[in-house]
Amino acid sequence: MLKTILGQVKQYKLAAILTPLFMLLEVAMEMIIPRMMGYIVDNGVYASDMNYILREGALMVVAAGIGLFAGVMGGKYGAMASAGLARNLRDAQFKKIQTYSFGNIDKYSSSSLITRLTTDVTNVQNAFQMSLRMGTRAPASLIVAMIMAAIISPKLARIYLVAVIFLAIMIMILLPVARKMFDQVFKKYDALNESVQENVTNVRVVKAYVREQNEKDKFKFASGNIYNMFIRIERIMAAVMPIMMGTVYTCILLISWNGAKEIIYGDMTTGDLMSMLTYCMNILMSLMMLAMVFIMITMSVASMQRITEVLTEEPSIKNPENPVMEVKDGSIDFEHMSFAYGEAKNEDSYVLNDINLHINSGETIGILGGTGSSKTSLVNLISRLYDVSRGSIKVGGVDVREYDVKTLRDEVSVVLQKNVLFSGTIFENLRWGDKNATDEEVHHAAKLACADEFIDRFPDGYNTYIEQGGTNVSGGQRQRLCIARALLKKPKILILDDSTSAVDTATDAKIRKAFREEIPGTTKLIIAQRISSVQDADRIIVLDDGRINGFGTHEELLANNEIYRDVYESQTGGGSGDFDEKGDEE
């Protein structure tokens, strides 16, 4: 874990090295000053030697100046190194997430990933800075002060040693308890972020159903959980302070009492006692700083583990050693293909079972099936968003696992069930399909998707700004923009996953007519709930419980397939007729 995290220091290694060096210089200056004060008292004040006082005082000022400079530079380089580490950790996580397959993404909630990129990184940043500065300064100050105290009076230095051992034991008892609680806290953060994300993203639904109070209560509950956890942690940590302060004052009393007797007996000078008291404060303040470092590190360990999980997660889909870099055509072959999500590979877990299909390049294929029939799962496998569990899928006569992933996905354009637009202009959103597309190509793709009809009515046309998630356009408009975006890729295979459910039947018919006339060489797979959306397809697949129940033309299925015939009759007879009234699948 530490190797993974510290490996992200990279270009900030020099700053990370300079920080503890400057902190050691600061400690050295601070440790010299108490001894010089003792010399001034013993050799200057008692001897009434003003020259000695001025000379030693000037040296103290120089030492203090050097210490101040070292402290400022340590702070500067510490901030640079910790902020740089945070930057690299966020960058590395974000880039790693981009390599994930759908299978990897399924392991993490989006709110959890957001927490790891923000709160967790901030915790690691603070702990790293604290470790570089206080983690160097505190033990160095402690060790040097102990040595200086032992040189002055080995007998009194034993008091420090007992105090240090006592406090170290107390810290070791309390910190493991706090660490377990910090592990739980960050899981609560995930729940809080999830509540915020859901509410902000779906605020229109919340208001439509007048569920504001319910959302407030849910947020209050999630926030309250974090509050209660931190209160419990603070109670544990609060116990450290009175124990430490009690130890400090006890040490001061014991050293003052025993030091005064040493002075009376002539075994110690007044200056030595002043130095001992100063070192006493240095030692115990160093212990307090060490406790803070341990608390911060304890808090960040849970964050480091969560970040490391993201960085070490291996993408389940990778390029082969010598990938195929060209897709010959849009033909698709399913050969005894079965698929299960996750690690489960037994037959009971398969959501698709023993699929055998051959689809010719340029064909239009309709896909129908009820909820849970795995329509979306079937098409997701074609562009290798998931890998098959058994058997194979071939595109252009080549197993999809042999292709370069980017090459395959550029040629298999998918309009997913959930239509997502990004903040930016319509031009910018459509050019996700082809960043180098000309204005004419963008206009043509929009025309094929019947999106030009509403884009031209916007005052700014294609420069109209789309809010995050496309919230300022209707569902049907979002679907058409997503179809246009997919068409700009000029794919050999186009997959529409229930992507015209929000448009009227007339517009749906126009889109299908444009596909037939403008992109006849592109293989088109259309998942739909309406028979009218697929009845003019070359062939139609009927899925039932992850198996092919029927495959043929509209007329063939009407004659031979009971499921297809029942749905057709219910729709043409005035029933709802949809397999799934929600238009939603697995």
Image (cartoon, helix red, strand yellow):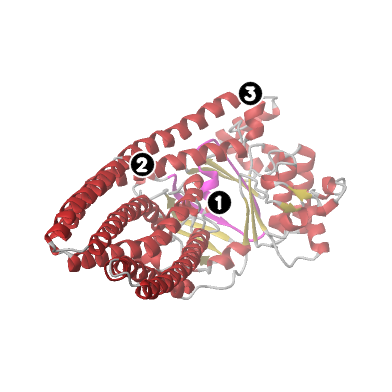
The reply, left or right, for residue 183 in relation to residue 485 is left
Label number found at residue 210: 3
Residue pictured at 48% horizontal, 58% vertical? 100
Upstream in the sequence, badge 3 or badge 2? 2
Query: SS of the residue at dot 2?
Result: helix
x, y percentage for residue 237?
32, 43
Q: Quadrant of the N terminus?
A: bottom left
Q: Which residue is mark 2?
A: 184
Q: Which one is nearer the viewer's eye here, 332 or 552?
A: 332
Q: Amino acid at mark 1?
A: Val
In the rendered structure, which segment of residues is drawn in magenta?
351-378
Which residue in the rendered view is the most extreme toward the front? 48
Q: Is residue 64 above or below residue 485?
A: below
| Mark 2 or mark 1, whichever is nearer to me | 2
Quadrant assignment, res 407: bottom right
**Would residue 383 be visible to someone looking at this image?**
yes
* Circle 1 Cα neighbour tier, 10 Å, few/some/many (<14 / 14–19 / ≥20): many
The earlier-in-sequence mark between 2 and 1 is: 2
- Residue 84 vs residue 58: left or right? right
CA gap between label 2 and label 1 equals 39 Å
Q: Nearer the viewer, residue 278 or 103?
A: 278
The residue that disc 1 covers is 379
Image coordinates of residue 205 in percent, x first then y, are 64, 31
In the rendered image, which quarter is residue 494 located in?
Answer: bottom right
Q: Secondary structure at mark 1?
A: helix
